[in-house]
Amino acid sequence: MMKSVTHKEYIAANIRLEALLKEVGNDAPEDDPRIIELLEVSDIIEHYEEMHFSIGLPTLKEMIELRMFEMGLKRKDLATLLNTSASRVSEYLNGKREITLNVAKALHQKLNIDSDIILQ
């Protein structure tokens, strides 16, 4: 477990990360001290951001709506894709009905929605 990171340490880590990225190329060996430092600095930044800027998982409704937008789908198109009715899709999106196992599988396979989001 990493100790708490201060804002000052976070800023210093970001500055050092930028400098290291300019020095180290993709061809640097993994045991190069700069690569090791780069990983350590990245961990400090990640830890600070998780503590102060944590976003969390999107809701299933948000992910479905995002995929519908990305794929240009209307609710009736989504219903066809999920092998269900448009009214059933509305019930899922409005939280009036729990999704079935088959719908969960279809959301994962056909819309590429992460199972962690489906199961939350």
Image (cartoon, grey):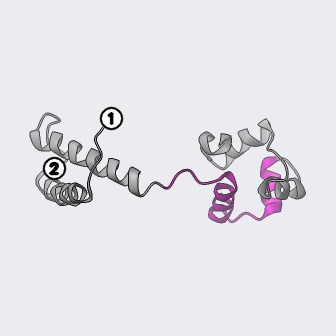
User: Mark 2 packing: few (<14 Cα in 10 Å), some, or many (20+)?
Assistant: few
Residue found 39% across the figure and 56% down from its top: 52
Residue found 29% across the figure and 52% down from its top: 45
Q: Earlier in the sequence, mark 2 or mark 1?
A: 1
Q: Secondary structure at mark 2?
A: loop
Q: Position of residue 69 (x, y in %)?
A: 66, 65
Q: Position of residue 95 (x, y in %)?
A: 79, 54
Residue 98 in which image quadrant: top right
* Quarter occupied by the C terminus: top right
Residue under numbered circle 1:
1
Compare residues 98 and 47 and report the one nearer the observer: 47
Residue 115 in the image: above or below residue 59 = above
- Residue 51 covered by magenta stretch: no
User: Mark 1 packing: few (<14 Cα in 10 Å), some, or many (20+)?
Assistant: few
Compare residues 57 and 87 and report the one nearer the observer: 57
Residue 39 marker? none
Residue 33 in which image quadrant: top left
Residue 56 in the image: above or below residue 76 = above
Horizontal side of residue 28 vs 107, given as left or right = left
Magenta residues span 55-82
Residue under numbered circle 2:
25
**Residue type, label 2:** Gly
Q: Secondary structure at mark 1?
A: loop
Residue found 12% across the figure and 44% down from its top: 34
**Residue type, label 1:** Met
Magenta segment main secondary structure: helix
